[in-house]
Image (cartoon, coloured by chain):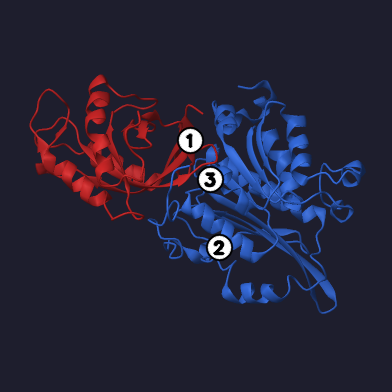
Chain colours: A red, B blue
Amino acid sequence: MIIFRARSDLLAAVRKDLHRPHPFAAERVGFLICRAGRLADGGIVVLAIGYDPVADDHYLDDPRVGAMMGPAAIRAAMQRAYHGGAEDLGLFHVHMHGHYGPTGFSAIDARESRKFVPDFFHVAPGMPHGAIVLSLDQAVGLCWPVPGASPLPIDRFGSVGAPLLTWGRR
Amino acid sequence: MDSRLVSQSFLGPDSDTILARIEAGIVGLCGGGSHLVHQLPLVGVSKFVLADPDIAEERNRNRLLGSTPADVKAALAKTAIAERVIRSINPDAEITPRRSRWQDAIEDLRRCDVIFGCVDSYRERDDLERFCRRFLIPYIDLGMDVHEAAGSYSISGQVVLSSPGGPCLWCLGILNEKRLRQEAGQYGNAGSRPQVVWPNGVLASLAVGLLVQLVCPWHGSPQLAACCEFDGNHHRVETNRLDAFGDLPCRHSPAEELGDHFFTRG
């Protein structure tokens, strides 16, 4: 089982940031910075500790997609994750679909994340990494638990605040 | 809406689904915990992690709801009694019983969406709350004590909803160095851990209410934090302590100190 938890005030800040218009990109993206814990069934609980938005000038102007990150964006995220071992952090790419309720990865989302997420293991090989799509009140996600593995769906999300919200497959 | 829960439909049209999805950890299954295992399945919670190392003993039977003389004779684990109680209400409940110290069940407890602590000592409360904070789990602490003062006894207790981002037991003064030092010598001062059933029932009912308002807020303004103090001599519950705390951030649990200290995969 893969569980993803974040404080509701952090998720609110992420949604607010992703909602901002960009000079040319159709949508914004960022990275949730995460730590993790082991679960009894061999699963993982991923815990968001912060959020790094992708800087305006780290986007590439590519009208074929909503947002295309340039190499500087990936480099900045990888620098954030790298702490030389035990203190390494997990990176979860995040963007938002502007509707309420359950959401999903578009074909482009899924294809692009499979290209760049595995690279995060080069700097933080011991941590899980992944990609998350937020809706205005829910989320869906993929987690790469180990280097070289196929991504697994995140089974359960928790938005920890008042109210306490949970959603997911289990 | 589950027909069993139709009388609580004011909690919201999806409240049965929301409550059924919640996985609740209960640490300590005697006094307060034995009330929780009755009430939580009744309101619709259907996933549980139960942690207690002990067996039912005759001296517990003044407060261990659901226990029988046969359980004592059979030296039945409190986890087994709790599981039986839950299944008598909801046969389909998903239950992870751990007859162990909670510290030996942490990889199951991390899965929980909320954890109730019904532990005996301040030291354990401290450890359990820190654990919950590290894994972004709201913690609902139940504590009760009987003290002797001037030849009579006073019953007191409290229920605290301690959520990540809100005040913790240290912020609220429930935990402090003096108490921990005193406890290291002796717990309470009215003999060997005096306990009675009715304050546990009051505190457990408040605790269940705090969970339900958190996940199915029926009044529009759910509380992230709460501190209900029970005066068992005057049969009153006060909630003033939280007012004194105000909106100050908790300085005991830094927001970035989450997860395993040294994460390794299983």
Amino acid, disc 2: Leu
Which residue position holds label 1? A166
Q: Are marks 1 and 3 on the same chain?
A: no
Task: For mark 3, give the secondary structure.
Answer: loop
The verdict on a common chain for dots 2 and 3 is yes
Q: How many angstroms separate mark 1 from mark 3 (CA)?
A: 15 Å
Q: Secondary structure at mark 2?
A: loop
Q: Residue furthest front?
A: A148
Residue B208, position as x, y percentages in the image:
65, 44
Residue B45 visible in the shown view: no
- Image point (68%, 64%), residue name: B121
Q: Is residue A92 left or right of residue B80?
A: left
Give me the chain letter of mark 1.
Answer: A
**Is the residue A169 above or below the residue B81 in the image?**
above
Chain identity of mark 3: B
Residue B19 in the image, given as x and y percentages of width and height: 58, 33
Q: Residue at x 23, y 38 (%)?
A: A119
Q: Residue at x 74, y 37 (%)?
A: B83
Helix or strand or loop: what does disc 1 sit on? strand
Residues tagged 2 and 1 counted as in contact (Cβ below 8 A): no
**Along the line of sight, the residue nearer the viewer: B58 or B108:** B108
How far is disc 2 from disc 1 in space, using C-alphas?
25 Å
Q: Is residue B184 above or below residue B211?
A: below
Estimate the spatial distance between the alpha carbons at disc 2 and disc 3, rounded to whole Å: 20 Å
Residue A58's label in the rendered image is none
Mark 3 is on which residue type? Arg
